[in-house]
Amino acid sequence: MPWNPQDTMQLRLDFVTLALKREIPFSELCQRFGISRQTGYKMLKRYESGGAQALADHSRRPLSSPRISAPELEQHVLQLRDAHPAWGARKLSRRLIDLGLATLAPSTVNSILHRHGRISEKASADACAWQRFERGEPNALWQMDFKGDFALLDQTRCYPLTVLDDHSRFNLVLHACSATDGSTVRARLQWAFEHYGLPAQINTDNGAPWGSPGKPGQVTELAIWLIRLGIRVTYSRPYHPQTNGKEERFHRSLKAEVLNARSFSSQAQIQAELDCWREIYNHQRPHQGIGMATPMTRYRNSPRTMPSTLAPIEYGPDDQVLRVDWNGKVSFRGYRLRVSSALHRMDVAVRANPEIADAYDLYFLHHRLMTFDLNQPDAAR
């Protein structure tokens, strides 16, 4: 909830009243009101010592300003902001430190930006804090998606393919594609696997070329290739793009810092721009979600290297192995099951479902294709 200047006192009183009731965890209450725990405790202390009047703003204007930033420091801040207009005070503050130019608090940088008209009122209102969970180490999960398409001046369309490491936010693929088919994606992933190794899991959106998880047994050729490489393939919930939240946030930064209000003549030109920005994003740009570190400082290559050939499809001694016919049909105990036609002439395995009587799971290697009940053969899921 934003602190509107017109009702700031009322919001502070509401916060203090709810906090004193102790009905809502303090951290959750602070999050609802859009303030930090430190600020919340400060307001409680002021209220307990002086009542409601103590919650009013105190003047912060000093009698003098002997430590105002030197003009050259302000110029460093402004030049860095002009070079990266979408960066906020925290990123600029950290980047100044990384460059060895100055040690300025984000609040000081913010004051400089305001004083020189570099922050609009709308930008201040739009600023918000993001909180996300992350995997504990690099390459545990990669997120993959296309950033919407747009027209180029040569009459073609560009579909930027992006792949992001969940733990480090390191960008592994940022490629200007002319199509969104599986072979295009596979070529870029092949490059990434050869350079960075294999991840344990890749999460994608729904639909082509990733897969159709809403339809039991359906996988694409791209997903089959990933599964055969030993990668766990998962999908976001339909109509819930926040499942790939870090990818969505990466796309916002890409749009704000590269694509907004710009035209590009060709795939080659946009790729050159993407390559330049990728270097900045991975190695220079402080990332608020990882404590203002740069993604490269948190990333390391996967110990699982890209194999030269795919391993054979093999199953355990207790699995009942079936061969997929043409058109994706599989026969089991007199029932005909339908899986992806991309699995034609490949082996799948049937295993008893441990939780449902008379139900079985159909697997392709480690990937569960569906669960089916012999008592309800049409209710595969």
Image (tube, helix red, strand yellow):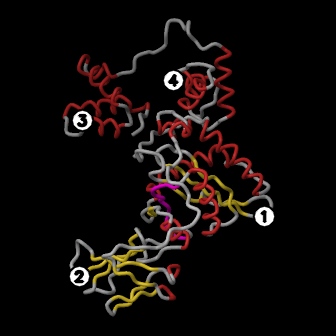
Identify the residue position indicated by label 4 in the image: 107
357 displayed left or right of 145: left
Distance from the alpha carbon under mark 2 to that under mark 3: 53 Å
The numbered mark at residue 155 is 1
Amino acid identity at mark 3: Leu
Give the CA distance from mark 2 to mark 4.
64 Å
Residue under numbered circle 3:
18
| Amino acid type, mark 2 | Asp
- Going from N to C along the chain, the mark reached first, 4 or 1, is 4
In the image, residue 73 lies in the stretch drawn in magenta: no
Q: How crowded is mark 2: few (under 14 residues within 10 Å), some or many (20 or more)?
A: few
Query: Residue 131 appears at what percent x and percent y?
Result: 41, 42
Circle 2 or circle 4, nearest the eye: 2
| Residue bounds of the magenta highlight | 198-208
Q: Residue at x 48, y 85 (%)?
A: 328
Which residue is painted at 68% across and 48% down in the image?
Answer: 274
Image coords of residue 212 (percent x, y): 48, 72
Which residue lies under the disc numbered 2? Answer: 358
Residue 279 in the image, given as x and y percentages of width and height: 65, 41
Specify the amino acid type for callout 1. Answer: Gln
Tag 2 secondary structure: loop
Q: Distance between the residues labelled 2 and 1?
A: 57 Å
Nearer the camera: disc 3 or disc 4: 4
- Tell whether label 4 touches label 3 (CB within 8 Å): no
If you read the primary sequence from the N terminus, does the residue marked by circle 2 or circle 1 appear first?
A: 1
> Which one is closest to the eye, mark 1 or mark 3?
1
Q: Is the magenta stretch mostly helix, strand or loop?
A: loop
Relative image position of residue 140 (x, y in whole percent): 44, 51
Instruction: Answer whether labels 2 and 3 touch (C-beta < 8 Å).
Output: no
Q: Nearer the viewer, residue 64 or 263?
A: 263
